[in-house]
Amino acid sequence: MLANLSPLLIAHLAAACLAMPLGLYQMVARQGAPGHALAGRLYVPAMLVCNLGALATFRPDTRFLPFHILAFVGLYSLISGMLALRRWLAHRNPADLKTHKIQMAYSWLGLMMAAFSQVLTNPRFGIMEGFEPTQFWMMLIGLNGALYAVGSWWLFGRLLRRKLA
């Protein structure tokens, strides 16, 4: 299944597999605690490798896929979340901390959406074989819409109500 992956895709996959549990830990651990900061220091580079790896898979002789566009969205969430944290650390403005929480949470939610989409739709995994293009795209849109709705409900219901350690 993974034997014919390029080193770039292996690095992308390894970074994603590292970022998924780290991001989940970030969502459930006490914010501001030393473990949260350490996990964040590991999560951010893993997400950079993951997103940049996804973008690097684009070749001019292939199509620009929705996954490439979502990698740009993921990079935006990650970078804006980290810039908000830097502003919060410098000025302690609560709006910056809220922006950090939202953007970092959405970077993780986007990663989870991409992971579920890849596992369910990539023929390499054998789950979604035999679908017509319309069925495929409807399934992909429906799956990601549901993941976004449930993820947003959970993140906003839990994350934004939490206090710092």
Image (cartoon, rainbow, N blue to C red):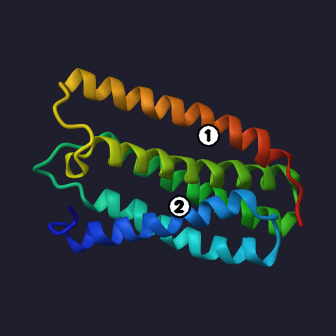
Quadrant of the image containing the N terminus:
bottom left
At x 33% / y 23%, what residue is drawn? 138
* Front residue of this view, candidates 127 and 75: 127
Specify the farthest residue to the front: 127
**Taking the image as drawn, is residue 114 in sight?**
yes
Percent position (x, y) of residue 106? Answer: 60, 47
Binning the other alpha carbons within 10 Å of mark 2 as few (below 14), some (14 to 19) or many (20 upward) gives some
Binning the other alpha carbons within 10 Å of mark 1 as few (below 14), some (14 to 19) or many (20 upward) gives some
In the picture of the structure, the residue carrying the numbered disc 1 is 151
Quadrant of the rendered structure where residue 70 is?
Answer: top left
- In the picture, measured across the screen, residue 53 lies left or right of residue 149, that is left
* Front residue of this view, candidates 39 and 45: 39
Q: Is residue 147 above or below residue 123?
A: above
The amino acid pointed to by label 2 is Met
Percent position (x, y) of residue 3? Answer: 17, 69
Quadrant of the rendered structure where residue 30 is?
Answer: bottom right
The amino acid pointed to by label 1 is Gly
Percent position (x, y) of residue 100? Answer: 72, 55
Quadrant of the rendered structure where residue 104 is?
Answer: bottom right
